[in-house]
Amino acid sequence: MTSLRVLVIASATIAALLPTVPAIASPPPTGRHRIANANSGLCLSPAGGTANRNEQTVQFLCDADLSRAWTIEPVEGNVVKIRNVKSRQCLTVAGGRSDRNAPSVQFPCDNDPSRRWLYAPSDDGLFRLVNLQSGLCLTIAGGGTGRNDVAVQFPCDADPSRFFKLQ
């Protein structure tokens, strides 16, 4: 019951942070996808394509390597967990941190709120991923457009690097 209460409180907090998200947002996609940053066009991947626990998540070419593919699994409403196809580990923020620029990593999936993301669609077919633990958006550090630039969390704003699209 405690984890459900945390989920409800975190969801309410995130909803307050994102007033532009429609009250009845389109449901999150399910299944296997590549997740590309809207600013760079590059896809999320564990660094080096490895299956190592705590490997940082970076952006890299959107090729057929299984490390670039993620399974989006609904949890409740627009809350999802995002599991790497190759490693079977979940996208999370290192150590469950809540500070700006904390790197994202892959880690075994469990019920920790840092391994849950609010799928927040926008009108243009793009979406934000808001970490349930921190209330911060997944983005690419410094809005970078290079290969291997690290995915971090940062306050949600209109910067194109805070948005993603599916491929």
Image (cartoon, rainbow, N blue to C red):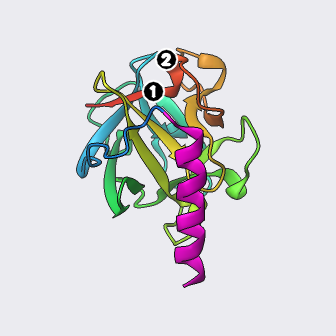
* Count of marks, rendered view: 2
Question: Residue at horizontal 53%, vertical 19%?
Answer: 158
Q: Is residue 136 above or below residue 148?
A: below
> In the image shown, does 95 or 18 lie closer to the viewer?
18
Q: Residues within 10 Å of mark 1 (few under 14, many from 20)?
A: many
Magenta segment includes 14: yes
Judging by the rendered image, the residue that carries numbered circle 1 is 163
Identify the element where label 1 is drawn: loop
Looking at the figure, which quarter contains the N terminus?
A: bottom right
Please say whether residue 130 is visible from this viewpoint.
Answer: yes
Judging by the rendered image, the residue that carries numbered circle 2 is 160
Three-letter amino acid code at the position of disc 1: Phe
Q: Residues within 10 Å of mark 2 (few under 14, many from 20)?
A: some
Q: Where is residue 129 drawn, in percent x and y?
A: 47, 41
Query: Farthest right residue?
Result: 99
Three-letter amino acid code at the position of disc 2: Pro
Q: Where is residue 150 drawn, in percent x and y?
A: 61, 31
Identify the element where label 2 is drawn: helix
Q: Is residue 64 above or below residue 117?
A: above
By secondary structure, the bulk of the magenta-drawn segment is best described as: helix
Q: Where is residue 128 drawn, in percent x and y?
A: 45, 35
> In the image shown, does 80 or 88 lie closer to the viewer?
80
* Tags 1 and 2 touching, CB below 8 Å: yes
Magenta segment includes 24: no
Q: Where is residue 116 drawn, in percent x and y?
A: 50, 58
Q: Is residue 154 above or below residue 143?
A: below
Question: Residue at horizontal 51%, vertical 71%?
Answer: 110
> What segment is highlighted magenta in the picture?
1-19
Quadrant hosting residue 54: bottom right
Please give left or right for residue 46 compared with residue 164 in the image.
right
